Amino acid sequence: MAAKMWAGRFTKETDERVNDFNSSISFDARMYRQDIEGSMAHAKMLGKCGIIAQEESEKIIAGLKGILADIESGRLMFDPNAEDIHMFVEAELTARIGDSGKRLHTARSRNDQVALDVRMCAKCETEEIIKLTVSLADTIISIAKDHLETVMPGYTHLQRAQPVTFAHHLMAYAQMLLRDLGRLKDAYARANMMPLGSGALAGTTYPIDREMVCGLLGFDDITHNSLDGVSDRDFCIELVSAISLLMMHLSRFSEEIVMWCSWEFKFIELDDAYATGSSIMPQKKNPDVTELIRGKTGRVYGDLTTLLTMMKGLPLAYNKDMQEDKEAFFDAADTVKLCLSTFIPMLATMKVLPENMRAAAAKGFINATDCADYLVKKGLPFRDAYKITGTLVHICIEKGLTLETLPIGEYKSLCETFDEDVYGAISLETCVMQRRSAGGPAPDAVKAQIEYVQNELEKYRK
């Protein structure tokens, strides 16, 4: 086993159980690229500032490039006995180029090194999640454009409430995704601060150039306090919080799809490629993708709780507790990417059943508000119109009729203001088409929503 970097202080070997307990190579190995790129920038700065010889700087960078190439080609495997990815890379570098490799760690600590790696990783993960979220929004828009006039019932309390269109319903989720993208962008900005040079906690006496490293690695700025630079994980928590909200929106959408593809609703049918069957019931077609997303949302909430709880009692600066940041952060990022990458094609391939949506909208008196509005537009106070319409609904229920089939005589028996034109006013199509207020379900209003979302999405494309 490789000697510990800090072995000089100790007279006994570390217990094997402690080695296993302390090790993070099993999960932080995924940061190998960030670790190597950060080290190359650090080595370049050390050479330029005269802290190490220029030749040694170049030798280190060449060695690191070779390690990166060998890892990515599969020629170099991670050593499970290494303590972490940082020590693995440094040990491999020293084995390849000799004592020059031992100079790489000059003017830095593993504390600021890991802070750098996690921030670089957070930036990469955020970019991938943003790309997938934009793709989901694009898919929603594509479907919405085909269903601007597909009437369906809108719900409150899971009771049929007022008529909307399928496009209008879908675009509500597009709005949620815009908020998710805004939060992801904010989280990215918070991660985009370069901590290397903070040292263990108190900076360094070497004449380093932090701004140079910042520029080489593509960060916006350096962190401005060394204690905070090594102990800040707000950016991780903020990113996982944004992911949690995104997962919540996916879970809500998934819940609706579970209902919509049931025989009780039958508003959609999932493609066979995105559904599963039963081991005993041959007729079953189960929406397992959406059910798993609901379940995985709870898992991501757990990751957020882990991070918040881990950090809540830590004094400055770095503490070993913070090693627990990576598994929770990685799990949240991996989970949301998996969910998005499966949900998008599932949504794109589902079959919409407009006839069933229209049939459901015809039931439940969801045009009752429009009946009341009909009277208001003819001069009645809304509360009087509301009461009259409620009585009409009660009569319809008793007689097994709908507002569309209730005879005009019944209408006039309650209010002489009613006339034959009430039937046109309460038709579902009229109810939808007349709701032209900004944000409403009328086709032109939904087209405006689509245009708005498309324009907003351009801010997040690369």
Image (cartoon, grey):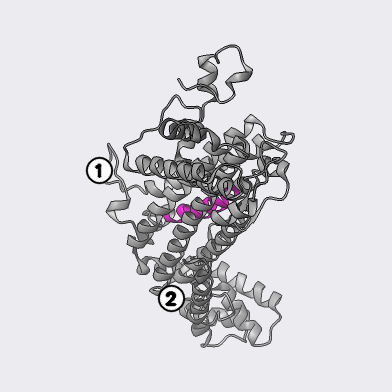
Horizontal side of residue 66 vs 223, given as left or right = left
Residue at the (56%, 40%) spot, across then down: 303
- Note whether residue 294 is visible: no
Indicate the secondary structure of the residue bearing disc 2.
loop
Identify which residue, 262 or 213, lies in the foreground. 213
Which range of residues does the magenta coloring cover? 240-257
Q: Which percent across, then down, holds residue 376? A: 65, 82
> Relative to 12, is 425 above or below?
below
Q: Which percent across, then down, holds residue 326? A: 54, 38
Q: Which percent across, then down, holds residue 68? A: 40, 43
Circle 2 residue = 148
Tell me which amino acid carries mark 1.
Pro
Q: Which percent across, then down, holds residue 432? A: 50, 77
Tell me which amino acid carries mark 2.
Leu
Q: Quadrant of the N terminus?
A: top left
Residue at the (66%, 72%) spot, across then down: 387
Q: Is residue 255 magenta?
A: yes
Question: Mark 2 to mark 1: distance in Å?
Answer: 36 Å
Task: Locate residue 323: give its quadrant.
Answer: top right
- Note whether residue 190 is visible: yes
Identify which residue, 239 or 267, lies in the foreground. 239
Horizontal side of residue 256 vs 50, given as left or right = left
Circle 1 residue = 282
Indicate the secondary structure of the residue bearing disc 1.
loop
Q: Is residue 29 magenta?
A: no
> Relative to 13, is 301 above or below?
below
